[in-house]
Amino acid sequence: MPAPAREPRPRSASYLTRTLSPSSVPMKDLLASCASAAAVSTPPCEPSAVSVAEAAAAKDAEAGKLESRREREQRRDAARERDAA
C-alpha cells in the first residue's frame, strides 16, 4: 500500500508582514548597514588650511626650498587663524 501523499504545510506569512526592530537584527548587520549608509551619504571633507600649508611645506622641503623653523611656524599659525575665521 503506497504512503498517502503529503500536502505541504502552509507557511505563515508573518515573516512578510513583521517589521524589523533594532533588537531583532544582529548587531553585526546593524553596524554594517550604518557604516555603509554613512559612507554613501557623507561628503568628503575639505582639507584644512593647516594640512594644506603643511603639505606645501613638505613639498618645498623635498624640492630643496627649505625654510626656517620660524617661517614654518608663522605659516602654520596663519593657516590656523584662517581655519578659525
Image (tube, rainbow, N blue to C red):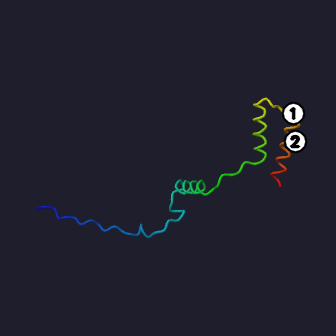
Distance Cα–Cα, label 2 vs label 1: 10 Å
Name the kind of residue labelled 2 in the image.
Gln
State the residue at coordinates (75%, 35%). Answer: 59
The residue singled out by tag 1 in the image is 68
State the residue at coordinates (43%, 70%). Answer: 17
Quick one: label 2 or label 1, which is nearer the N terminus? 1
Work out which quarter of the rendered image holds the C terminus and state it.
bottom right
Above or below, 39 against 8 in this view is: above
**Residue neighbourhood size for the residue with mark 2, other residues' Cα within 10 Å, grouped as few (<14), some (14–19), many (≥20):** few
State the residue at coordinates (53%, 62%). Answer: 23
Q: Position of residue 70 (x, y in %)?
A: 89, 37
The residue singled out by tag 2 in the image is 74
State the residue at coordinates (78%, 40%). Answer: 54
Residue 19 or 75: which is nearer the viewer?
Answer: 75
Instruction: Give the left or right position of residue 19, taking residue 63 as reference.
Output: left
Residue 59 or 21: which is nearer the viewer?
Answer: 59
